[in-house]
Image (cartoon, grey):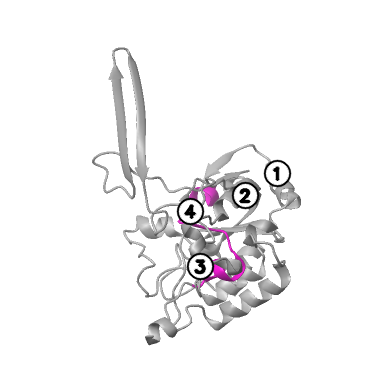
Amino acid sequence: MSETLEKDPMAPWVRELAAAHDAARHVDGEKCRGSVALIDEAARLRGTAAVRLGKAVSLERVLETRPGHGESPIEFEVEIGIYGRSVHGGDVVRYNAHGTGKTHLDGLGHIGADASWHGGVPASSSETDEDTLVNWALHGIATRAVLLDVAAARGVDWVAAGEPVTADELDRALAATGVELEPGDALLIYQGRDRFEAAGHSYPSGATAFPRPGIGEEGAKWIASKDPGIVLWDFHDARSNPQGSLEVHSLIFAIGLCLVDNSDLSRAAIALKEAGASTGLLVAAPLAIYRSTGVLINPLVLY
């Protein structure tokens, strides 16, 4: 066996978090549903109580499929039938749910180790009946959203590569909201990706292990300590460690974190600031698909 195959893909601190989570949250004979299990009636009521204006804002990055508007991140085929005065339209869509371009929700069957997913579920179950997204969809992901403007806390337009978001910056961003986090809340972590891309920068894929704007080990530990029900972010893992591993994505394996990648948080940041608020009701409703490792999604914040 090669050294690469023998190497533990999870850092020691990730294993420690996983062991602590197992001891506190796992029940013998029951599948652990990860962070979504923390979204209970109280969390939903906190969210509904945060809706004051009856307005909504989408957190989804738009998928461009119009001819002549650049390469589409999905395969999209439209079928139009014109039969006399009757017209029928249909379409066929094929996509990779992951990557750095499309807003998507990661399932528990996305990041694993030792031939298993979170909670010791065999990775082979993804070939038969892995049910993360079915369970999460039926549970209902609706909870209080708390938006943390990390770029503002740092005093920059966007978080730079080589400078991972720190726990202190997350604390300062949280303090600026005046909100006390509670288990099951949704964390919306805004790092200024929209400005970064507007300035002409491209956000690199996570397939290559080199530093990029985002959250590193310190920030990942901070997130885990807050027991969020779901995390939505614009930039991903900073990959600032020697192994180039995915610090926050590793929490999918360690604590069953529900994670929404590539969220467009700029509109929510502006809307909530104009409303004099930092919270709202987050609704993230994935499709109930057996064996899915992730799914495109349009999260909404009502405020």
Q: Amino acid at mark 1?
A: Thr
CB atoms of marks 2 and 4 within 8 Å: no
Which numbered disc, 3 or 2, marks the residue that appears first in the sequence? Answer: 2
Q: Which mark is residue 48?
A: 1
Secondary structure beneath dot 1 equals: helix
- Cα distance in 3D space between marks 1 and 4: 29 Å
Q: Which is closer to the viewer, label 3 or label 1?
A: 3
Position above or below: 78 against 244:
above
* Residue 215 seen in the current view: yes
Q: Residues within 10 Å of mark 4 (few under 14, many from 20)?
A: many
Which range of residues does the magenta coloring cover? 247-270
- Cα distance in 3D space between marks 4 and 3: 17 Å
Label 3: which residue? 249
Which numbered disc, 4 or 3, marks the residue that appears first in the sequence? Answer: 3
Q: Position of residue 62 (x, y in %)?
A: 40, 45
Q: Position of residue 5 (x, y in %)?
A: 41, 81
Residue furthest out toward the front: 128
Depth check: give the residue in front, 122 or 101.
122
Secondary structure beneath dot 3 equals: loop
Label 4: which residue? 292
Q: Which is closer to the viewer, label 1 or label 4?
A: 4
Q: Amino acid at mark 2?
A: Ile
Q: Which mark is residue 141?
A: 2
Q: Position of residue 75 (x, y in %)?
A: 31, 45
The answer to whether 3 appears left or right of 297 in the picture is left
